Image (tube, rainbow, N blue to C red):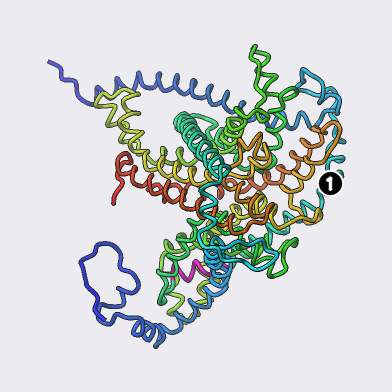
Amino acid sequence: MTTITSQDRLTSINLGKKRREQLGNILAWLILVIGGIMMMIPFLWMVSSSLKTLDEIYTFPPKFIPSAPQWGNYLRAWTAVPFAKFFWNSTYVAGMVVLGQLLTCSMAGYAFGRLRFPGRDKIFLFYLATLMVPFAVIMIPLYVQMQYLGWIDTLWPLIIPSIFTPWGTFLMRQFMVGLPRELEDAARVDGASFFTVYWMIILPLTKPALATLGIFTFLGSWNNFLWPLIVISSLNLKTIPLGLVAFQERQALKTPWELIMAAATFSILPILVVFVFGQKYYVRGIVTSGIKGGG
Amino acid sequence: MKSSRTVRTGALTYEEQLGARKVGLRAELRRAFTGLQREETISAYLFLLPNFLGFLAFSLLPIGFAFYIMFTDWDLAGDPAFTGAQNFVTLWNDRLFWKTLWNTFYYTFVAVPTGVFIAFWLALLMNRKMKGVLFFRTVYFLPQITLTVAAAIVWNWIYHPELGLLNYLLGSIGIQGPRWIHSTAWAMPSVIIMSNWQGIGFAMLILLAGLQGIPQEYYDAAEIDGASGWQRLRFFTIPLLTPTIFFVVVVSLIGAFQGFDQFYVLTQGGPAKATTTLVMYIFQNGFSFFKMGYGAALAAVLFVCILIITLFQWYLAKKWVYGFEE
């Protein structure tokens, strides 16, 4: 009498399993490829349209591949409205915000996460509570404050308030809480001040969190639309999203879609590049917040 | 000052760590500023100072200020006139407000479930040992990092009723495409499609990470016991994934409820206010009509709605989220 052990069962399952798994993989791969193509179509269409002439745009049925790629469209779009200014504004604002955030939020995160002082947990609770308040609630009084400071129609409202979002502090604090104490204690025993500990020991250890915060903040600032729309009215101070919309709203007998698509293309190109290089940190940032939040 | 000491599990706060004997602000402060602890306390406050000042000025202060503005009538030109709850009465009778609220709910509760549903299946497909997973992940995530405004502009062109790609593709298989963003019935679905195109990557990423967190042993154990693929999915994968799904759903709901960018660019809230969201309405009231008080009141309603939705999700979570305590 032969008994079927679980080992035998596992083996027979494995043989059939391999086949089924391979088949499943091929099927999954196929579906993902088709879905991926569908996701990419808007991008492809955008680039394809950007290389057409105005007449080609207005012919029906549309062709996917333009007969002669009009690279000049990019130059014409770039100069039609001052995109150079827009790019500079967006980059300047984003850069300043990132610098400010990395500095102040890491310092505050250090205080909340690794130092002891009265009121620490209560104050941090306040930070968390304000995270829940939607921006729409803040934007009206914030505008009033900006007007009082005389900052309307300057770049300052885009920079200063964004440096102090509680989100950055939250991220840094969460990360710093998890660091081991040994290095810190050793340095303290050797007589290092808290600032030295922060600067020489803790900060280098938090490079991944800093990278994540930096990338998130940079992309978020670049993408910001509502708040700049509220505070900026001069054409020269517009950021890229504002500039794109201004470009699209210009009146023309025939809307120059090929130029608009060209503008859209070179507007998203820098972010794509930043993302491709910083992908690791960006993805990790999203995932860790998801895992921590989801348990 | 008496403090009732009940038995608590979990980590002790800083205050408790210092000892159970002297509780009270005075004693605490005194302790914090004596001896070795003094340097730590002062350093901590110094580290915190810049961030906290900014937080005070640009997070706390506006919130408090908003709480005042919503009870006034103010157009920024003169002084605010205190009107009590008048704004809320106006709000209640404002048909446009209710339409906007409906639009926002319509958008949120169609876009998020469909998006998460599709993202779930995508994540499931990607959670396999095969080549190119990283490539797929990037491809599906790419729309997420595109500028929302740029994406909306491209979709504006795609949705063009006569010259756009979508109606052309539909026409080539014999379907007469609708007028998309220019039709009152199809405007909101148009925005939903575009938003989901952009947003699926985010949900998929988190769900994929959640899936990858399920240990392989669970699957093996289920297989040995004879569970089929579908059974494994229903009784193992999905229940174990519910915390992640919960997180994705809540975050997406909160974000969707505050939708503005794509609505402004794609449809400008039209046609006939069919796609005006609550945030858009607040924006119009505050910065086109300069009715600051009314805008603030609307924003308060927005906040309360989000709070209710979130709390409701937390309540429901006990029923369907695996391992949801408290």
Location of residue B20 by image quarter: bottom left
Q: Residue at x 34, y 24 (%)?
A: B230
Q: Which quadrant does the N terminus of chain B fall into?
A: bottom left
| Majority secondary structure in the magenta region | helix
Whether residue B204 is visible to the viewer of this picture, yes or no, is no
Q: What span is in magenta?
A: A104-114
Q: In this rendering, is residue A287 above or below B124?
A: below
Question: Tag 1's secondary structure?
Answer: loop
Amino acid under label 1?
A: Val
Is A236 on the left or on the right of B108, as rendered?
Answer: right
Is B304 on the left or on the right of B1, as rendered?
Answer: right
Chain letter belonging to callout 1? A
Location of residue A142 by image quarter: bottom right
Crowd around label 1: few <14 · some 14–19 · many ≥20 (10 Å): some
Q: Which residue is mark 1?
A: A81
Q: Is residue A243 magenta?
A: no
Q: Residue at x 52, y 72 (%)?
A: A198
- Percent x, y of residue B191: 61, 34
